[in-house]
Amino acid sequence: GAVVSQHPSWVICKSGTSVKIECRSLDFQATTMFWYRQFPKQSLMLMATSNEGSKATYEQGVEKDKFLINHASLTLSTLTVTSAHPEDSSFYICSARMAPNTEAFFGQGTRLTVV
Amino acid sequence: AQSVTQPDIHITVSEGASLELRCNYSYGATPYLFWYVQSPGQGLQLLLKYFSGDTLVQGIKGFEAEFKRSQSSFNLRKPSVHWSDAAEYFCAVGGTGGFKTIFGAGTRLFVKA
């Protein structure tokens, strides 16, 4: 199956700094990528949907200015958590899809801890 | 609006016993349905998916699921559970036209010896 890689797998940062998480589709071109957030022992909550070359569509309640999403190419999307705070600590997972009506493939996730 | 309900927060099954995890969905058209498994601190692994055709879907690791349109359900089953099956299981629904995938709350499976 198709492979989606996230980097880094885990990151610790100081409060107030920004962190960038990368999501790459390694063997296919992803027209759409999705970013999810998962709190401990909870389900995945969709944060935003990004289509290559256009602005991301954010879910209700997700701060656009805090979670910056860029999908500049068909194989790379990035999520930047700006001015991170301890409450942003979470597990962030991306998924990528080749086209509508096709399966989305998930990355292995990034554990963010803000101290 | 799309929604997914997994009624059981956690289930405990004896090793070797059969398993059924419940999933009900709400979607206005023909849904795409998925079951994923997640081990602690890990990403998601797709167990199986239903897009169309045969309503009984076979997946990896001996899992299967049956799509029942009349009941809006997509329950996951396994005839004999192994200790290594202990994990969190998520049911998800997506749709045509590029709709996003929505996840249920998850069911934590515990396996006792």
Image (cartoon, coloured by chain):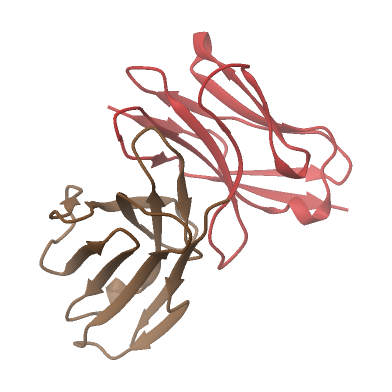
**Front in this rendered view, residue A75 or B50:** A75
In the rendered image, the residue lying farthest to the left is A65
The residue lying at 51 percent from left, 12 percent from top is B69
Compared with A67, B10 (above or below) is above
**Front in this rendered view, residue A65 or A104:** A104
The residue lying at 47 percent from left, 76 percent from top is A9
Q: In which quarter of the image is residue B11?
A: top right
Kindly tell me whether residue A110 is visible in this rendering. no
Q: Where residue B63 sits: x, y (%)? A: 73, 37
Q: In this view, does B40 lie to the left or right of A109?
A: right
Q: Is residue B63 left or right of residue A1?
A: right
How many numbered circles are shown? 0
Q: Is residue A93 left or right of residue B80?
A: left
Q: Where residue A71 sits: x, y (%)? A: 23, 62
Compared with B59, A70 (above or below) is below
Q: Which chain is brown?
A: A
- Image quarter of the C terminus of chain A: bottom left
Kindly tell me whether residue A34 is visible in this rendering. yes
Q: Which chain is red?
A: B
The residue lying at 12 percent from left, 61 percent from top is A64
In the rendered image, the residue lying farthest to the bottom is A14
Compared with B94, A7 (above or below) is below
Q: Where residue A89 sits: x, y (%)? A: 35, 74
**Front in this rendered view, residue B93 or A77:** A77
Q: Where residue A65 sits: x, y (%)? A: 10, 67
